[in-house]
C-alpha cells in the first residue's frame, strides 16, 4: 500500500549502497551459537574474495567462542539469502552472489554451544 | 432599582461554555482548509458532537488541581534530596533502571507533548481538541517532573547526564525514538490510536506499573511519588484512548478495518518496545516485583482479553500476533538482556550476570525455559567475567528495519534459532525481526525505507567517526564510567564505600 498522505510521498531510502563508500552491507550469523546475541552487520567491498572473508573477517567476529576452533569447515553448511549456498573461495563476494544487505548464515554440525544450550 | 444578578453557571453549563463554547465554524475560509489533516487518513466522521468527554475537565480546574499535586511532589523531591534518599535504595544496580527510564522513556513524554499539541490543533471537533491540549500539557509536566525526580541521582551516579542528547543518537534509544517518530508522522487519528490507545490504554500498565512498583520495592521514594502524582493524568489518558476508538468505530463502519490495522500495528510496535521493560523487571531490579511473564499474564492476557471482548461488538478482533507476543513473554526478557550484555561497552548503563539467588528466582519463574536455554549461558558469562575475560561482542549487530532492535529475538517455537524475515522494495532488501514488523514494513515501505538505523549510520560515517570510541564520544558518553560491566564500575565502587561506612557507623 502507499502511504496515506496530504501530498506526494516519495523519499530516498537512507541505506542505498552508494552511501557506504564503496562497501556493501553483509549480514552474518553463526546458527545455534547465541552467545553472540544477534547476527552481525559488516561493510565489505563486493570485490573481496570469499577466501579473504573467511580468513580475515569471520574469525574477528566469532573466534571468542570456545566452539570456534572446533569447527570443521568442510562440514559447514551455508545459506545465502535463504538459499543453499556453496562458496567459491577464489571468487569475489559479488561473484558468489552477495548483493547489498545479503544475509549469510552458517551451521556447524556437531557443535551445539555452551553446555549444549545452543549459545 | 436592584439589578438582577445573573445566576452562577451549573457544572454542565460551565463545562460546555469552557470547551465546546470556545469553538466556532470558520466562514472566511473553508473548514477543510483550516483542518486539512483530519480526513486524509480515510476516517469518516459524521458528527463531531458525538465525542463524549468522560472527565468534563475545564482548563481553570485543570490548573488548580495540577498545581496542588505538584506542590506535594516537589516537597517530597526536596526532602528526598535533603535526606540523601539515594542511600536508602536496595542496591546501586537499581539506578540502571532509572538510567534506562530517563534516556528511553522521559524523552518520549516530550515527544508526546509535541504530538498532542499538533493533533490538538488539527481536529475540527472541539471535544477531542480540548482533550488533546490538556494531555499535551500533562506530557510536558511529566517530562519536567521526571527529570526533577531523578536529577538527585545524577549527582552521584554515571550515565544520567545527557538524556535528550543520547535519546537522539544512541543505538538502543533509536528503538523508543523511532516508535514515537513513526506515530508523530502519521495522521492525527493514527497518532491517537498508537499513543492513546495501544500505548496508554492497552500497554501502559506494563510500562508504568513495573517501573513505579520497581521503584517502591527498591526504596526510591522520589520516583514513586512521581508515579503517584502522574496517576490521575494517566487515568485520563487511558480514557481518551478508549474514547477515540469508540468514537471512530461508532461514526462509520468503514472506519473499522482502518482502526483494526492500526491496532495490529501499534500493538506489535508496543510489545517490541516493552522488551526493554521486560528485561528491567527480570534483571535490573535488585528486589523483584514480579516476573515479566506474570506481568504479561495479568496486564495483557487478562485485562487486554476483557477489553477486546468488549470491543468485539464493534467488529474489532484482538491484535494480530497477540498469540506470538504471549509466547514471547517466556523469552523476551532473557533475549533482550543478552543483547545489552553483549553491547554494554556501547551503552550508557551497566549490565551484569544476576547473582545466584537471582538466577534461582528466574529458574523458578520460568521453569520450562530458563534452565534449558538461558542459565548455562549466564553461568558461562559469569565464569568468564570472574576470570578477567568479560565477554563483549566486538561487531555491530544487524538491526530490524522497523523496530530497530538488534535481531536477537528467536523464533518462539524454536528458541535456539533467530527469527528472520525479509522484504524486497525497489531492488533493495529490508530485513525484519518478526512477522509483526514485516507486516508493518510491507504495508508502508515508502515510510520505513527512511529509517535511521544506527548501525548503518555509523558505517556511513554519520556518527562522529569510524572507530567505536569516536561514536561513543559523539553519544556524549564518559568512557569507562557510563558504559561497561557493573562489577568494577565507579558506581559500584562508590556504593560499596557507602555501605562500608554504614557498617562502621
Image (cartoon, grey):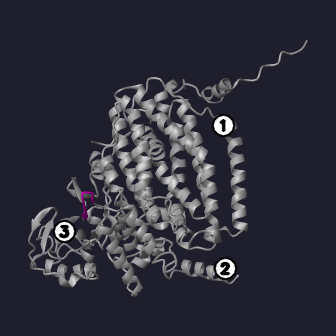
Discs 3, 2 touching: Cβ within 8 Å: no
Residue B208 position (above or below residue A74):
above
Residue B117: give x, y in percent of width and height: 55, 43
Q: Specify the quadrant of the image occupied by residue B65.
A: top right
Residue pointed to by mark 1: B59
Q: Which residues are magenta?
A: B411-416
Residue at the right extreme of this rendering: B1
Q: Is residue A93 left or right of residue B265?
A: left
Q: Are marks 2 and 1 in contact (CB under 8 Å)?
A: no
The relative height of residue B475 versus residue B55 in the rendered view (above or below) is: below
Q: Position of residue B273 (x, y in %)?
A: 41, 56
Badge 1: residue crowd in 10 Å (few <14, some 14–19, many ≥20):
some
Seen at 45% across and 39% down, the residue is: B188
Dot 2 lies on which element?
helix
Name the residue beneath numbered marker 2. B502
Q: How far apart are the alpha carbons under marks 1 and 3?
A: 59 Å
Kindly identify which chain the residue marked by label 1 belongs to: B
Q: Secondary structure at mark 1?
A: helix
Q: Position of residue B45 (x, y in %)?
A: 43, 27
Q: Position of residue B109 (x, y in %)?
A: 54, 52
Could you tell me how far apart the alpha carbons at marks 3 and 2 are, in whole angstroms?
55 Å
Verify whether residue B108 appears in magenta: no
Helix, strand or loop status at disc 3: strand
Disc marking residue A104? 3
Between residues B474 and B139, which one lies in front from this camera angle?
A: B139
Amino acid at each position: 500500500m502507499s502511504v496515506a498522505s496530504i501530498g506526494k510521498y516519495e523519499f530516498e531510502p537512507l541505506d542505498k549502497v552508494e552511501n557506504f563508500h564503496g562497501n556493501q552491507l553483509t549480514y552474518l550469523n553463526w546458527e545455534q551459537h547465541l552467545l553472540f546475541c544477534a547476527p552481525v552487520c559488516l561493510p565489505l567491498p563486493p570485490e573481496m574474495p570469499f577466501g579473504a572473508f573467511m580468513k580475515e573477517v569471520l574469525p574477528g567476529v566469532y573466534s571468542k567462542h570456545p566452539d570456534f576452533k572446533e569447527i570443521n569447515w568442510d562440514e559447514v553448511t551455508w545459506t545465502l539469502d535463504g538459499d543453499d549456498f556453496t562458496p567459491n573461495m577464489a571468487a569475489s563476494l559479488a561473484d558468489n552472489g552477495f548483493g547489498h544487505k545479503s544475509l549469510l548464515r552458517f551451521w556447524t554440525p556437531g557443535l551445539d554451544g555452551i553446555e549444549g544450550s545452543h549459545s | 432599582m436592584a439589578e438582577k444578578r445573573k445566576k452562577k453557571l451549573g457544572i454542565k453549563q460551565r463545562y460546555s461554555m469552557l470547551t465546546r463554547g470556545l469553538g466556532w465554524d470558520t466562514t472566511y475560509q473553508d473548514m477543510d482548509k483550516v483542518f486539512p489533516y483530519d480526513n486524509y487518513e480515510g476516517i469518516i466522521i459524521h458528527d463531531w458532537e458525538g465525542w463524549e468527554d468522560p472527565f468534563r475537565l475545564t482548563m481553570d480546574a485543570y490548573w488548580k488541581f495540577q498545581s496542588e499535586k505538584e506542590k506535594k511532589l516537589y516537597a517530597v523531591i526536596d526532602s528526598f534530596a535533603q535526606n540523601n534518599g539515594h542511600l536508602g535504595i536496595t542496591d546501586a544496580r537499581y539506578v540502571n533502571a532509572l538510567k534506562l527510564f530517563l534516556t528511553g522513556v522521559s524523552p518520549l513524554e516530550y515527544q508526546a507533548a509535541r504530538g498532542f499539541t499538533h493533533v490538538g490543533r488539527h481536529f475540527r471537533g472541539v471535544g477531542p481538541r480540548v482533550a488533546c491540549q490538556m494531555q499535551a500539557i500533562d506530557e510536558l509536566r511529566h517530562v519536567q517532573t521526571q527529570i526533577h525526580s531523578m536529577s538527585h541521582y545524577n549527582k552521584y551516579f554515571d550515565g544520567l547526564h545527557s538524556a535528550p542528547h543520547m535519546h537522539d543518537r544512541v543505538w538502543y534509544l533509536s528503538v523508543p525514538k523511532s516508535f514515537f517518530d513513526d506515530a508523530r508522522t502519521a495522521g492525527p487519528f493514527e497518532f491517537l490510536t498508537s499513543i492513546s490507545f495501544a500505548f496508554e490504554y492497552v500497554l501502559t500498565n506494563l510500562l508504568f506499573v513495573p517501573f513505579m512498583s520497581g521503584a517502591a520495592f527498591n526504596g526510591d521514594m522520589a520516583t514513586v511519588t512521581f508515579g503517584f502524582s502522574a496517576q490521575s493524568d494517566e487515568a485520563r489518558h487511558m480514557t481518551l484512548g478508549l474514547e477515540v476508538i469508540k468514537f471512530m468505530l461508532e461514526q462509520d463502519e468503514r472506519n473499522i478495518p482502518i482502526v483494526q490495522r492500526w491496532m495490529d500495528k501499534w500493538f506489535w510496535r508496543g510489545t517490541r518496545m516493552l522488551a526493554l521493560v521486560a528485561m528491567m523487571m527480570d534483571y535490573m531490579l535488585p528486589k523483584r516485583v514480579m516476573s515479566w511473564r506474570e506481568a504479561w499474564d495479568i496486564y495483557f492476557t487478562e485485562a487486554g482479553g476483557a477489553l477486546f471482548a468488549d470491543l468485539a461488538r464493534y467488529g474489532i478482533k484482538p491484535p494480530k500476533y497477540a498469540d506470538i507476543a504471549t509466547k514471547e513473554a517466556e523469552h523476551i526478557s532473557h533475549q533482550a538482556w543478552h543483547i545489552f550484555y553483549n553491547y554494554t561497552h556501547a551503552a550508557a548503563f551497566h549490565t551484569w550476570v544476576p547473582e545466584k539467588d537471582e538466577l534461582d528466582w528466574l529458574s523458578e519463574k520460568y521453569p520450562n525455559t530458563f534452565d534449558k536455554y538461558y542459565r548455562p549461558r549466564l553461568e558461562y558469562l559469569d565464569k568468564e567475567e570472574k576470570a578477567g575475560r568479560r565477554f563483549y561482542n566486538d561487531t555491530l549487530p544487524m538491526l530490524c528495519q522497523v523496530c530497530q532492535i538488534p535481531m536477537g529475538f528467536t523464533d518462539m517455537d524454536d528458541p535456539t534459532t533467530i527469527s528472520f524475515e525479509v522484504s524486497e522494495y525497489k531492488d533493495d532488501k529490508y530485513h525484519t525481526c518478526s512477522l509483526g514488523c514485516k507486516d508493518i514494513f510491507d504495508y508502508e515501505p515508502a515510510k520505513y525505507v527512511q529509517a535511521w538505523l544506527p548501525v548503518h549510520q555509523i558505517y556511513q560515517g554519520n556518527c562522529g567517526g569510524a572507530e567505536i570510541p569516536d561514536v561513543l564520544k559523539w553519544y556524549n558518553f564518559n568512557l569507562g564510567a557510563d558504559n561497561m560491566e557493573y562489577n568494577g564500575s565507579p558506581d559500584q565502587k562508590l556504593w560499596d564505600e557507602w555501605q562500608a561506612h554504614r557498617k562502621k557507623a
